[in-house]
């Protein structure tokens, strides 16, 4: 007989994700993923000026802000036939890289590491032994015995207060934790250092986009001007500061994040055979090196992999109405032609129809509709998106830098290629792409400086910005790669206003409920077979779901459980 476990919310960042699993004989035999918040951006945008869409859509999240804005401006530019200047493309790439560097470091240390690092165990560590380990794996300067001893004293004093704050609900002492106390102390030290560092790199957004979170964007280019001698423009001082921020980021990633990732992973190699889930992977690709119209030159290639066959990459066409479609068979929405059909986003409908249980409730009715997320499919295949998909598509495409990074990690950990299709592989892929992005950011930064030195200071092309020049009807799609995976916005413009706008976000691909055929999505599939030693402390489930970096923030709180408005925005 199976036992139902509910974890709600399982997210450690924005949004409410509920996981219900059936456990039998110590393993997960069935799983359900439910988004318990509703998103209304499609309704908010209808009838608005397309040039303003980015400002709304980037507020779908407080984390993936800049990539939503990027997808949005690309959507409008695609519909209206606008090509941005090279400098604007480079600035967008730099803002993209800054987002990834911050997001992935925060995920590893603050959202995922505590699934593997036992904070309480660190109290028993020998600081001198921790120092020896730190100096063996990295040249990072903060590694003396005194440094770790002082940190441990502060940690002991913190624990003795009895007010553990964010650490209060951990499953400390669980048998699934395998790190020795000294490595746990190292992890806690870098948890705190990463917290301090992550606020620095996002200053790139404030320099190019005016602020963070939610930096400014512009249809047709970048929202800043270049003049190396002007105090209020992107001048020599600000460019030098951007360069320093990326230098510091590369140092932190290569001397702290990657060594820690490899050190922790070496104690958890068994997780290279757990949590694989779907055999299909999808990436839209991003970081154009020759303009967005040339996806063959993207740093992250575009493509799809089926059945874990790394010998074949399938092309993706987001404008082909037969490829990307959304189901609502198990989602709290209605379609005008029935709930068993699927729709391409250009024809998408957003009609809310909640039919779930009234709170408080014990379990969802998973036989019927059980989530606010729709269910996207690529050619009817359920697909995983995210860092692992990006690395696999790039690896299978023959991307040499990616192949070197992946093969090097597999060799260091002494695990086979099959270990990539797992919880451990997903976590490792995120770290490897962070290392690559830190290098690529320096390349883009150098190219921007060369352009400026050559006299090219163009940052926008406004020749088609005036609505009077637009056709009566237009359609567009803008794709990007959010840190959590493939992100795309679709727009239909009529009479210079938004007639339809649909967002298909990474967590929709991964966290969605079953489709009309009963096929599981990535979260649900990845949990099947996961061992659960203690149903009251299901840390194994946390590890696999958190390896995706779940964030369901592309949603809006509308009502409390009694149907009352919690907050209402009157005007922007």
Image: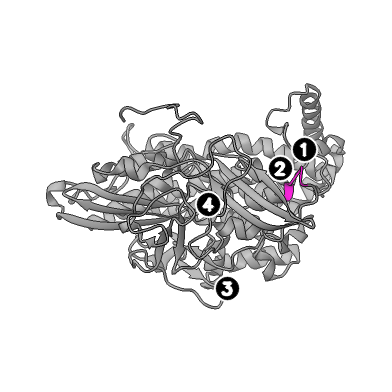
The quarter of the rendered structure image containing the N terminus is bottom right
Residue 537 in the magenta stretch? The answer is: yes
Residue at point 34% right, 45% down?
42
Choose mark 3 or mark 2, whichever is in front. 3
Lower sequence index among marks 3 and 2: 2
Q: Position of residue 469 (x, y in %)?
A: 13, 51
Sequence-earlier tag: 4 or 3 = 3
Residue 83 visible to an observer of this rendering: no
State which quadrant residue 160 falls in. Answer: top right
Discs 1, 2 touching: Cβ within 8 Å: yes
Where is residue 141 shown, x and y percent of the image? 71, 41
In this picture, residue 572 sits left or right of residue 189: left
Q: State the CA–CA distance, disc 3 to disc 1.
A: 39 Å
Q: Quick check: 44 above or below 519?
A: above
Q: CA distance from mark 4 to mark 3?
A: 21 Å
> Which label sits on residue 516?
none
Q: Are marks 4 and 1 in contact (CB under 8 Å)?
A: no
Location of mark 3 (residue): 307
Residue matched to label 2: 114
x, y (%) of residue 95? 43, 46
User: How far apart are labels 3 and 2 at the CA level?
Assistant: 32 Å
Residue at (49% x, 68% y) in the render: 381
Q: How many marks overall? A: 4
Q: Is residue 368 left or right of residue 260?
A: left
Q: Which residue is mark 1?
A: 119
**Can the viewer see residue 131 in this picture?**
yes
Q: Which residue is mark 4?
A: 484
* Magenta stretch encompasses residue 444: no
Magenta-highlighted residues = 535-540
């Amino acid at each position: 007989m199976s036992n139902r476990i509910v974890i709600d919310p399982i997210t450690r960042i924005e949004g409410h994700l509920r996981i219900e699993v059936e456990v039998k004989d110590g393993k997960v035999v069935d799983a359900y993923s439910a988004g318990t918040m509703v998103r209304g951006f499609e309704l908010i945008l209808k009838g608005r000026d397309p040039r303003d869409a980015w400002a709304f859509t980037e507020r779908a999240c407080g984390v993936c802000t800049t990539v939503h804005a990027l997808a949005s401006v690309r959507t409008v530019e695609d519909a209206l036939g606008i090509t941005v200047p090279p400098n604007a493309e480079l600035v967008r790439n730099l803002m993209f890289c800054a987002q990834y560097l911050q997001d992935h470091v925060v995920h590893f240390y603050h959202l995922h590491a505590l699934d593997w690092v036992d904070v309480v165990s660190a109290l028993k560590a020998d600081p001198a032994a921790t120092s020896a380990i730190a100096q063996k794996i990295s040249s990072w300067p903060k590694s003396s015995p005194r440094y770790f001893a002082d940190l441990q004293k502060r940690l002991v004093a913190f624990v003795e207060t009895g007010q553990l704050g964010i650490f209060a609900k951990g499953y400390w002492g669980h048998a699934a934790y395998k790190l020795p106390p000294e490595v746990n102390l190292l992890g806690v030290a870098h948890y705190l250092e990463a917290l301090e560092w992550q606020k620095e790199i996002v200053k790139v957004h404030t320099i190019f986009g005016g602020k963070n979170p939610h930096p400014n964007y512009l249809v047709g280019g970048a929202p800043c001007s270049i003049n190396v001698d002007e105090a209020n423009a992107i001048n020599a001082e600000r460019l030098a500061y951007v360069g320093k921020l990326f230098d510091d980021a590369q140092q932190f990633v290569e001397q702290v994040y990657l060594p820690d990732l490899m050190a922790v992973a070496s104690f958890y190699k068994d997780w290279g055979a757990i949590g694989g889930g779907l055999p299909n992977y999808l990436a839209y690709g991003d970081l154009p090196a020759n303009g967005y119209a040339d996806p063959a030159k993207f740093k992250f290639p575009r493509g799809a992999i089926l059945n874990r066959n790394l010998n074949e990459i399938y092309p993706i066409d987001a404008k082909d109405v037969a490829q990307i479609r959304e189901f609502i068979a198990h989602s709290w929405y209605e379609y005008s032609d029935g709930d068993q059909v699927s729709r391409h986003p250009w024809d998408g409908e957003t009609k809310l129809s909640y039919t779930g249980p009234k709170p408080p409730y014990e379990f969802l009715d998973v036989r019927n509709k059980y989530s606010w997320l729709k269910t996207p499919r690529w050619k009817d295949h359920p697909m995983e998106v995210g860092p692992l998909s990006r690395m696999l598509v790039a690896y299978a495409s023959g991307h040499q830098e990616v192949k070197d990074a992946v093969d090097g990690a597999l060799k260091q950990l002494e695990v086979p290629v099959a270990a990539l299709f797992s919880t451990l592989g997903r976590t490792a892929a995120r770290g490897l792409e962070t290392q690559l992005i830190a290098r690529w950011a320096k390349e883009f930064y150098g190219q921007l400086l060369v352009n400026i030195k050559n006299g090219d200071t163009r940052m926008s092309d406004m020749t088609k910005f005036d609505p009077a020049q637009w056709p009566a009807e237009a359609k567009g799609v803008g794709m990007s790669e959010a840190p959590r995976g493939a992100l795309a916005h679709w727009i239909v413009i009529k009479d210079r206003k938004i007639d339809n706008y649909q967002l298909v976000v990474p967590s929709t691909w991964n966290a969605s409920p079953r489709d009309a055929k009963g096929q599981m999505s990535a979260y649900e599939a990845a949990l099947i077979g996961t061992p659960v030693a203690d149903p009251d402390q299901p840390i194994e489930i946390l590890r696999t779901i958190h390896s995706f970096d779940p964030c369901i923030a592309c949603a809006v709180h509308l009502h409390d459980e009694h149907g009352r408005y919690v907050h209402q925005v009157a005007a922007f």
